Image (cartoon, rainbow, N blue to C red):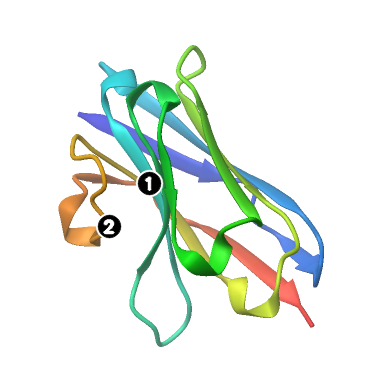
Amino acid sequence: QVHLVESGGRLVPTGGSLRLSCAASGRSFSSYVVGWFRQAPGKEREFVTAVSWGGTSTTYTDSVKGRFTISRDDAKNTVYLQMNSLKPEDTAVYYCAANRIWYARGPQEYDYWGQGTQVTVSS
């Protein structure tokens, strides 16, 4: 069982930066893949990025490549999402999620979810 709590979301201007955190509790967190998803009003939840066990591999959706960076610190049981050059279309509730399947991009493939944190990018 893994319990996830996101934090760091807030209102930022276009072009600004933000770092989200996903703090985990539970056993064997380092053995989980952790992903970030986002959901804008009226839209489906979409995959953003994920980091593998040990942080050796990462994957990103095309719209955030070069702007977002995912990382993990297993000593702190925390995964981070650094977001730079933010755009209004990045506005959404951001969720972190965990599973044991690498390269899973569908929300249904993730077993554990946080409650989400709101990111709003003003134009």
Cα distance in 3D space between marks 2 and 1: 8 Å
The residue lying toward the viewer, choosing from 43 and 53, is 53
Q: Is residue 104 above or below residue 85?
A: above
Residue that mark 2 sits on: 105
Q: Sequence order check: which comes first, mark 2 or mark 1?
A: 1
Q: Please state which amino acid type lies under the numbered disc 2.
A: Arg
119 lies above or below 75: below
Q: Give residue 48's position: percent from left, percent from top.
A: 44, 59
Going by the picture, which residue comes out furthest to the top? Answer: 75
Image x and y of residue 37, in percent = 41, 59
For residue 86, above or below residue 49: below
- The quarter in which the C terminus is drawn is bottom right
Q: Quadrant of the N terminus?
A: top left
Q: Residue at x 26, y 47 (%)?
A: 103
**In the displayed structure, does residue 76 sit left or right of residue 57?**
right
Q: Are marks 2 and 1 in contact (CB under 8 Å)?
A: yes
The label nearer to you, 2 versus 1, is: 2
Residue at disc 1, secondary structure: strand
Tag count in the figure?
Answer: 2
Residue 43, horizontal then vertical, whole percent: 39, 83
Q: Name the image quarter holding residue 106.
A: bottom left
* In-image side of 22 versus 13 (left or right): left
Kindly identify which numbered label has been placed on residue 64: none
Find numbered disc 2 in the image and state the secondary structure of the residue it sits on: loop
Three-letter amino acid code at the position of disc 1: Gly
- Residue nearest the viewer, comparing 65 with 104: 65
Reading the image, the residue beneath label 1 is 35
Q: Residues within 10 Å of mark 2 (few under 14, many from 20)?
A: many
